[in-house]
Amino acid sequence: QRVALARALAPRPAILLADEPTGNLDEANGEAVMDLLFGLRDRYGATLVMVTHAPELASRCDRVIRLRDGRIDDEAAREAAE
């Protein structure tokens, strides 16, 4: 997982796409991966688009869009979501 992540991030992309980035990881490695993704987003000004079912990860995002039955059900900026 880490090697794939390093390979994807090496060219410093402007947009990072992460589909359930912590899905198959234990808690410690999941936190490490998310800290890395959010750190790269902040350091390089990249946009991070993440799919997750974990509310604790969504709470770290600047904007949250919730889908239900394939449609946008709710959308909020961080301040409104808290």
Image (spheres, rainbow, N blue to C red):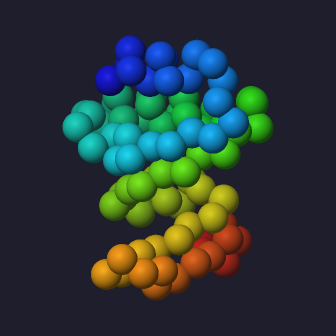
Quarter that holds the N terminus? top left
Residue that appears at 41% across and 63% down:
55
Please determine whether, in this image, residue 36 is positioned above or below residue 17.
Answer: above
Position of 43 with respect to 53 (left or right) is right
Left or right? Give the position of 14 relative to 22: right
Residue 53 in sight here: yes
Where, quadrant-wise, is the C terminus in this rendering? Answer: bottom right
Residue lying farthest bottom? 73
The residue sitting at 59% across, 46% down in the picture is 48
- The residue under the point 23% across, 37% down is 24
Q: Answer left or right for 33 relative to 60.
A: left
Horizontal relation, residue 17 to residue 48: left or right: left
Give percent across and percent down for residue 30: 36, 35
Q: Position of residue 73 (x, y in %)?
A: 46, 84
- Residue drawn 36% across and 77% down? 70
Asked if residue 42 shows in the view, the reply is: no
On the image, the x and y values in percent for residue 32 come to: 45, 29
Quarter residue 4 falls in = top left
In the rendered picture of this protein, how many numbered marks are placed on residues? Answer: 0
